[in-house]
Image (tube, grey):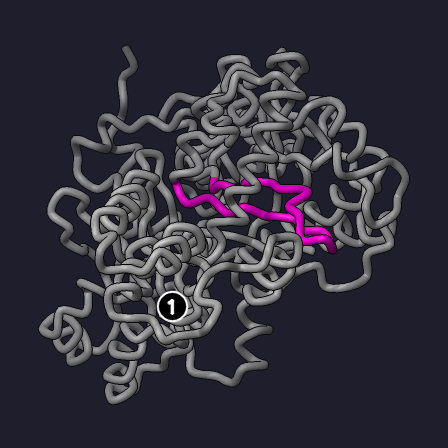
Amino acid sequence: MKLIDLAALDQDEKSTADIINAVCHELGFDYASYATMNTAGGDVQGYANYPDEWKIHYGSHGYHKFDPTIYTSMLSIAPVDWGRFQKDEKFNAVFRDAHDFGITSRGLTVPVRGPYGECGLLNVTRDCSDAEWDKYKRYVMGDLQMAAVNAHDTVMQSGVLSRALYLPSLSTREKEILQWVAEGKSQQDIGDILSISHRTVEVHMRSGREKLGALTTPQAIGRAIGLGLITPG
Amino acid sequence: MIIVIDGINQHLFTDILDEMYQLRARVFGDRLGWEVNIENGRERDAFDDLHPAHVVSINDDGDVVGCMRLLQTTGPHMMADVFNAILDGEPPIRSAQVWEATRFCVDTKKLGRGRGKNSISYVTSEVMIGSFEYAMQAGVLDSIAVIDPVMNRVLQRSGNAPYDYLGTAKPMGKVVAMAAMMDCSEERIAGIRAYAGIEHDVFLSEDEALALFARSKSPLPANQDHKPLTDLERYFVEQISASTTEDERMATLKLIETLTDTFSPEQKVALLGTPRAFAHEV
């Protein structure tokens, strides 16, 4: 039986709205939204920083019942560029209206699949030229993937009960590497100590960070110590 | 050449997927002797129902000669749920920037040795280039591939050696299975391309893939005289295209059967056999 310190999990937890806003400010998107589906009722829950008029229009026209950026994107493991929906009547129906509210149809959706098979979707839009979009997309895709999983986990783990039940399951390797970081070792040092490549160290570190819901390695170390997964160096 | 088939475009490629499942049955069931579920000469498992991305290689004759299946490690995947023996009881990697590659195989009957276009080595490289480039576009940095020692040696010899392995190799049927780690990077792709002599874009468009695949098949019986589809025919084609499970597909086929009087024999054969042929008309 493990004792779980809720306070350790609660360190300045970012809300989904904060993450959505940060995606726009830091990665340079016009608008962003996160959505997930309640599988039982089919309700769409989410956060968006679109203008209120558009949110009201979208909801009152029932677009959330057929918007392909939600329903079709769920079927992909990779981010879906909305260019793929160009011939989709449903997409065009939603975005013809969006245009009147000053919202571009240039965007993409990052689908996240969770451990229980549930799916979360991070949508972003940016009004720009074709060339700029292609270049830009490549540049931010990794960060978008991280933001998407972060937003999804934040929603899934909200609520005190689910937090209490949630203790990240870190592998021995992940704990070992975080322990060496806490001891002050560099990634290269750790690779040498454990006789593995620095790339392997990096993969385990990334996985450990995500399991702990941390954006940076120091944050992950803090949480891992707080949860008693590793000891202070 | 490579086509990536995912949950969004799979309705266009049911025939290609069917041939891919047959290839997987021959490789993983017959040749490697893994304990896989084979029905009607097709190997399919629960992960195929989760809308993975299939990276499929089609040769110049229009045959499916190689494939690989990609899944996110944030959700259900094989290392977590099936191959966990390889991890020696450790929890699996979970990262939005790591994908898992499983069911990686090439057709050793149709392909030969050497390094020419119809060789095991060439198609292996082509599938790898396709999956790494697809992963990179998605912002993915590393992949974990469940492979056997033969495939491992092919990778090591073709400028594509894994940089590490997760857990330990474990017996699986007639061979052992191991989890190889590979970075999805420009450097690795350049190495594979240099070794295989592949300089061109390996991806086919959806239309090109369908045209190439049709090359090896008998002429399509469907709608030869190009009569416009009736509303009822159109309805059935849409139903079959939209079906995501075998049960749904069978239900539609059964309905076509029961409406025998409404269709001419030719229409019926065409509808039952090749709904794909109509796909562009609906």
Q: Which residues are magenta?
A: B50-72
Q: Farthest residue toward the right?
A: B114
Examine the image and state in which quarter residue A68 appears: bottom left
Image location of residue A51, percent across then percent down: 22, 78
Q: Is residue B258 above or below residue A69?
A: above
Q: Is residue B33 left or right of residue B192?
A: left
Of residues B189 and B254, which is closer to you in this image?
B254
Packing grade of label 1 (10 A; few <14, some 14-19, many >=20) is: many
**Residue drawn at point x = 54 percent, y = 46 percent:** B54
Examine the image and state in which quarter residue B22 appears: top right
Q: Main secondary structure of the magenta part?
A: strand
Q: Quadrant of the N terminus of chain A?
A: top left
**Residue drawn at point x = 24 percent, y = 64 percent:** B232
Q: Is residue A185 left or right of residue A143?
A: right
Q: Is residue A97 magenta?
A: no
> Residue under circle 1?
A124
